[in-house]
Amino acid sequence: MDVLVERLDAKLREWEPNIAATVKERILEIIDLADQDALDIMRSRAVEQEVLDLLDEPISR
């Protein structure tokens, strides 16, 4: 079995039921987006944070 699948399986059993359910929902969303070949239009959290960081920078004169 793939390492990712093994780790996910272990974590889903370890987490609280509400957290595990949320993770399952997010994974299903990602699978659906991948099936639609739409992952490239999703914003990554890293890119989003980078934009927020730029907006928070003081304006230099």
Image (cartoon, helix red, strand yellow):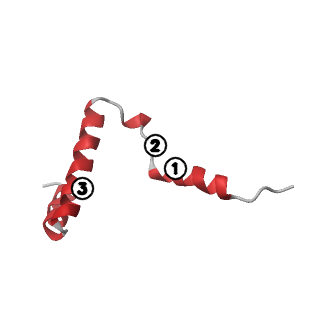
Tell me the residue that label 2 is attached to.
Answer: 43
Query: In the image, residue 20 lies at what x, y percent?
Result: 19, 60
Q: Quadrant of residue 37?
A: top left
Query: In the image, residue 16 lies at what x, y percent?
Result: 18, 68
**In the image as oriented, which residue stretches furthest toward the right?**
61
Q: Which residue corresponds to the image point at 61% horizontal and 57% vertical from the top-left?
A: 53
Position of the C terminus, as image quadrant, is bottom right
Tell me the residue that label 3 is attached to.
Answer: 23
Q: Which residue corresponds to the image point at 52% horizontal and 49% vertical from the top-left?
A: 47
Tell me the residue that label 1 is attached to.
Answer: 48
Q: Are marks 1 and 2 in contact (CB under 8 Å)?
A: yes
Q: Amino acid at mark 3?
A: Val
Q: Is residue 12 left or right of residue 33?
A: left
Badge 3: residue crowd in 10 Å (few <14, some 14–19, many ≥20): some
Q: Give the CA separation, mark 1 to mark 2.
A: 7 Å
Front residue of this view, candidates 17 and 29? 17
Circle on res. 35: none
Q: Give the CA separation, mark 3 to mark 1.
A: 20 Å
Q: Which residue corresponds to the image point at 20% horizontal and 52% vertical from the top-left?
A: 24
Label 1 SS? helix
Label 3 SS? helix
Badge 1: residue crowd in 10 Å (few <14, some 14–19, many ≥20): few
